[in-house]
Amino acid sequence: MPGPAAVVLLHGDESFLIEDDWRRLLAGWRADLVSDFGYEALDAGQLTADRLRDAILQAPFLDPYRVVAARGIPGRRADSLAAALGEVPDSTRLLLTVNGRLAAGSKLLKAVQAAGGQVREHAPLKGRALTDWIFGRVKEAGLPTSAGALLVRSARPDLGVLDSEIRKLAAYRASGNELDQAALEQLVAGGRQDEIFKLTDNLLPRPTGEAWRVAANLLEREGATLIAYRLARHLALVLEVRTRQERGESLSQMQDEMREHRFVVQKAYEMARATSSERLEAGLKVLLDYEWEVKSGQIDAELGLGVVLAKL
């Protein structure tokens, strides 16, 4: 925690880490409060410098200090709040989060630093940092390292999805079930990443009969719309790799720069060489149309997925 004038500003491009930091820090601060009067959550969308200043300067009533928090301040409005931090009493703990990353010259960022506070930037995780985060969460949840290895191999850089998978595994184990390798592969959606690779292999550069068999196996364990979502994410990855190939980037350069696991990038690299950007863009449009048609009730999800595969 910072010094007596505890001010913390969270910003960056990784919203999950910002939210996680927000929850942990707020829980620690609120633990010492003895009444509901000690915590004030401000509407970040309507917040002004005057409103923030009034909240900061208000004295605590029954509590040892007041906690003032504003979550999700629009980036374009962040600097307009800087003037409110001219004076932060020892009796106030202030927590702010901004949507997106602030530039080094941001007035709000400088105001927080001038008040003796902390500025924490959360950037997207990739490579070793993502692996360490996964294994850290797995250990924290009391799960076996084999669960971490499977999640790393799934290489889904969406921290919210990964966190959800870890919580699901922890709940399964807490209910008294054995979490062996077979159970892990059944429970972790990302554990079937190989099948998405295989499905894509049989769709590009043109669909084969094997694609429908792979899709049928997937449908036994998860919904058609989830398969379509995962397929769309994978095609988007292959399209990004294809675009980088056209710019002359090497495989090793992509693996160093992209958030996905190096193995996943390598597979996408091989697939990208067998197709074109136009084909991938057309495939993504087909999947987008499918999503809208399912949500609007125009087609059955499973039957529609078969049609989608034929169009890719």
Image (cartoon, rainbow, N blue to C red):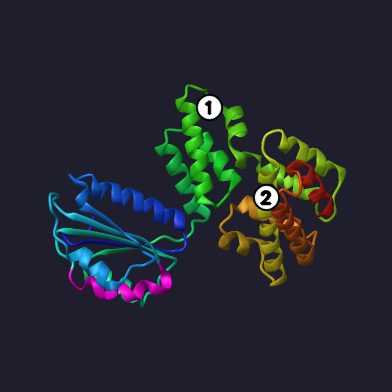
Q: Is 31 positioned to the left or the right of 102 in the image?
A: left
Q: Foreground residue, 80 or 260? A: 80
Crowdedness near tag 1: few (<14), some (14–19) or many (≥20) residues, C-alpha within 10 Å: some
Q: Picture quarter containing residue 69?
A: bottom left
Image coordinates of residue 17 in percent, x first then y, are 42, 54
**Is residue 77 within the magenta segment?**
yes
Image coordinates of residue 176 in percent, x first then y, are 47, 21
Callout 2–callout 1 Cβ contact below 8 Å: no
Image coordinates of residue 67 in percent, x first then y, are 23, 55
SS for tag 1?
loop
Crowdedness near tag 2: few (<14), some (14–19) or many (≥20) residues, C-alpha within 10 Å: few
SS for tag 2?
helix
Nearer the observer, disc 2 or disc 1?
2
Give the numbered dot on residue 8: none
First in residue order: circle 2 vs circle 1? 1
For the N terminus, the image quarter is: bottom left
> Visible in this render: residue 116?
no
Q: Which residues are magenta?
A: 74-87
Image coordinates of residue 136 in percent, x first then y, are 43, 43
Q: Is residue 216 above or below residue 309?
A: above
Q: Which residue is mark 1?
A: 179
Q: Amino acid at mark 2?
A: Lys
Q: Which residue is mark 2?
A: 295
> Visible in this render: residue 146?
yes
Q: Is 65 positioned to the left or the right of 159 in the image?
A: left
For the C terminus, the image quarter is: bottom right
Q: Amino acid at mark 1?
A: Leu
Q: Residue at x 56, y 57 (%)?
A: 259
Q: Is 220 positioned to the left or the right of 253 in the image?
A: right
